[in-house]
Image (spheres, rainbow, N blue to C red):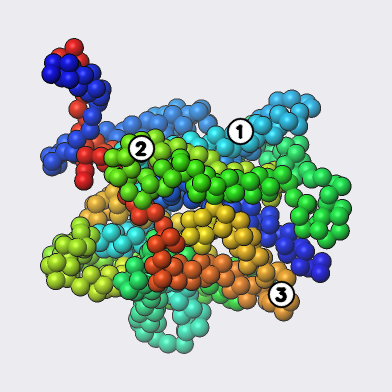
Amino acid sequence: MSQIISLMQAAVVFGTVIMFGAVGEILSEKSGNLNLGVPGIMYLGGIASLMGAFYYESAVAEPNKLLCLIIALGCGFGAACIGGLIYGFLTITLRANQNVTGLTLTIFGSGFGNFFGGSLNKLAGGVGQISVAATSSVFRAYIPALSNLGYIGKVFFTYGWMVYLALAIAIFCGWFLKRTKRGLNLRAVGENPSTADAAGISVIRYKYLATCLGAGISGLGGVFYTMDYIKGTWGNDLTIESLGWLAVALVIFTTWKPVNAIWGSYLFGILYWMYFYISGLTRSTQELFKMIPYLVTLAVLVFVSMKRKRENLGPAALGLSFFREER
Amino acid sequence: MAAVKSMHEKKEPFVRIAKRSGLQHWKAWGIRIIAMILALAVCAAVIYVIVRMNPVRVYATMFRGAFSTSRRTWVTVRDTMMLLCVGVGLAPAFKMRFWNIGAEGQILVGGLVTAACMIYWGGRMPTALLFAVMIAASVAAGAVWGLVPAVFKAKWKTNETLFTLMLNYVAIQLTSFFVAKWENPYGSNTVGIINQGTKYGWFPAVFGKQYFLNLAIVLAVTVAMYIYLRHTKHGYEIAVVGESENTARYAGISVARVYIRTMLLSGAVCGLSGFIAVSGASHTISTSTAGGRGFTAIIVAWLAKFNTLAMILVALLLVFLEKGSIEIASQYQLNDYASEMITGIILFFILGSEFFINYKLIFRKREAAR
């Protein structure tokens, strides 16, 4: 029993990182922008929150908890939005190829993140690994009364608050896309921008907003990873990159529905960590087990494309840039 | 009537965009060069902000990092050839607008089977045969990795971008599996240098140059691909499919067959570069054998407009930036990732500059505004 619970806990924490990434990417893809820069954006979010917290914590003797939180979250979200803005400016205004721009953003973000993650302390004149204990503790705090409720408390209440924020954002985005006029407009932009344009929807504005805010949400995945998952340090091991790609995969897995990202991300978490809880695996066969999330995504991808049910496919204009004068 | 007209004039935007029809070559390159200079200036500024190094010295140091000694020059050549080989492999796929972002995986499986040959058959068969087997195996492995998404794309229109992306991770986990199996020494979780003492399956030095063979093989492949894409029927079909699938179908080209054939080729060349990476450069295998080249090479292919000869320059530029930034970073004891950041900035500029080649900005005229 305790094994199952610890697997579920690992799955939820792992899933939260990619849930942020996937929900943000869904928003962006719904506007027709296939942003392959998600890993880079998550790096930007992670490193910016770390840098913000680092400078704040080293500037004052007694860091204020609320300020820690606001600074880390704001920096992370803001930097990720800027990443989305760069991508948006290049693909929407300058009509550069989306795939190539996204990959470039990933290269840039990973370079930026890992460079400052590894060098920040040295540049600031310190020694050793960077660490922001005070800020991280704010992100990792949970309510003791609830977490002591036996198994239920352990499964549902032993997480930092961003786990619940991810749930809220996913549900909100699902509602927004499905039930609001703006959500409908956004989907129209992704399906057929020319028609949306003719209907009086400002295609460019929707694309920019969806891409920037989507990137911001994806970036929160990076914030959660650095502040909660690895406890306010920096891991120079390219984990964020693989998580970012997993988030891109999750978007297909959810068939572009944010609410599906909730169970999908936890399922990915379980699949990813399962090897840890199966006895008798050697270190090499464990690696084969870690392949499962990707194989499952492949299976879904193939299955969806074979069925060709309209509502399960991605937006029709995904990956194409919009040029009003071109019909 | 007059009122309507004046309203129109008021509505004319400050700037509008129109497609250019065929810009002269030298102008297009002029725009690219301007973008490049701007990018280098921004990079110098970024480096200055971080380490307070004089921007002119920045590029002198970068040059030293890439070319100061004969050994460094050859390492630069070796890495350029690696990147070039992958880019050449990707060129046909991207020319037909098949988003093969799975080169990373194709390189890895190619490298993986090469390493397997070196480990299991090194010294057990004549060198020439060993090399033939390694080449055949790596080409076949890469081709299979390219074939699978192509078949699904041809049959069910499965999205190839995401398919090839997932296959990267399948290849990475497969590599991790074998690394753990072959690890040497036990517990290190790395394979170590394969056949370090005997050098079985290593590229021999030619004319006393360790990396001469890398250079020769890749340049041969590059030229062959140039001819294939420019001067053969297959190459023509690839171009037509890339321009418009419907046109291709109308012209009687079997799009499915072109997809499958081209991806076999693309995967095969990427697999071959895995062979070069393992047998000709690192002599080991790890999950970082491909080292992001599968992604960087897309940019190489894209920027060179799928002209494999132009790719030589682009690949050289990117590797120069990489080596140069590493040199600066190591001088200040900072880490190597600076190079990715610099590369990213430069690519942003080059990508943006394409807009000014394809479109022109028409500013509102004074008279019209009045």
Circle 2 or circle 1, nearest the eye: 2
Residue B11 image position (x, y, % from top left): 24, 22
Pointer 2 residue = A201
Q: Amino acid at mark 1?
A: Gly
**With A253 as the anchor, is A89 left or right in this view?**
left
Callouts 1 and 3 in the same chain: yes
The image shows residue A129 at horizontal and vertical percentages of: 69, 43
**Which residue is at a point 57% across and 41% down the rendered structure image?**
A45
Residue B336 seen in the current view:
no
For marks 2 and 1, give the CA distance.
Answer: 30 Å
Q: Are marks 2 and 1 on the same chain?
A: yes
Q: Amino acid at mark 3?
A: Ile
Task: Judge whether B185 appears above or below B123 on screen.
Answer: above
- Chain letter of the residue carrying label 3: A
Which residue matches tag 1?
Answer: A74
Give the crowd class for mark 3: few <14, some 14-19, many >=20 residues within 10 Å: few
